Amino acid sequence: MTKYAHRKALVVGETTDIALAIAKRLVEGGASVLLTARTDAERGRAVAELGSAARVATPSAVVTALSAGNSAAGAAALTGPTARGGDGTPGFTRGGVDLLFADAIPTARPLLPYVADGGAIVLTAPTPCPDAVRTFAAELAAHGIRVNAVAPGCIEAPGSGAVPLPPLGRLGAAEEVARAALFLATEATFTTGARLPVDGGLCRPCPGHRGPGTTRPP
């Protein structure tokens, strides 16, 4: 499968099941992937699940790895092999990330210099508010960078207790969030500033958000 061949993707933030599911689909589709993991256990799990096609770095080492590309300094920041694109070029260089998946805007912002013009950013945590997504998207529109967000909810997690089911009558899976995130990143090419709930119909307005027809309190 080569759906994402020659794409360079960065998955940063908390190493959740959703982040791993996104990285796994990218790897299976032929992308070069750099994933952050905070602990040795998280790094070990990521390497075991993603195999040799992905690289793993601590959050503090991501910028070093991106800046240094395939140099010795870049390799030293990573767990796993030093990947190259299908054309033999370094897997990651300044301005060379096509797809950025981040759990929040503050996580994504320091990495903007590494996102190529015409690239895509997808935010993967239940927040931010739709207004924040639209503002961030407007900020980057001049560079052709699309910014969208998935808003997962009622997603099944190992060891989680019983929770009320959404209208669809079941819990969702991390894989379903990953598919939605990848759709926004690679298929929805004329969409930016959108926030897509992936919650089985549970969607509620985020705190402080005023929808259409609402008025400001006196």
Image: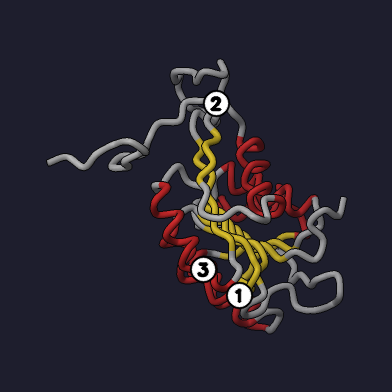
Q: Earlier in the sequence, mark 3 or mark 1?
A: 1
Task: Check disc 3 and report its element: helix, strand or loop.
Answer: helix
Q: Residue 52: x and y, percent?
A: 77, 59
User: Up-down: is 218 above or below 118?
Assistant: above
Relative horizontal placement of residue 119, taking residue 195 as reference (left or right)? right
State the residue position of label 1: 65
Q: Are marks 3 and 2 in contact (CB under 8 Å)?
A: no
Relative horizontal placement of residue 207, taking residue 186 as reference (left or right)? left
At 76% from the left edge and 60% from the top edge, which residue is drawn?
31
Q: Amino acid type of disc 3?
A: Leu
State the residue position of label 2: 200
User: Up-down: is 71 above or below 92?
Assistant: below
Q: Amino acid type of disc 1?
A: Ala
Mark 3–mark 2 distance (CA, rounded to whole Å): 30 Å
- Asked which quadrant contains residue 171, the reply is top right
Mark 2–mark 1 distance (CA, rounded to whole Å): 38 Å
Viewer-proximal residue among 72 and 30? 30
Viewer-proximal residue among 165 and 160? 165
Q: Residue furthest top?
A: 169
What coloring was used for the rendering? Answer: secondary structure
Disc 1: CA contacts within 10 A as few (<14), some (14-19) or many (>=20): many
Disc 2: CA contacts within 10 A as few (<14), some (14-19) or many (>=20): some
Q: Earlier in the sequence, mark 3 or mark 2?
A: 3
Checking the image for residue 203, the label placed there is none
Residue 39 in view: no
State the residue position of label 3: 140
**Which image quarter is the C terminus in?**
top left
User: Up-down: is 167 above or below 99?
Assistant: above
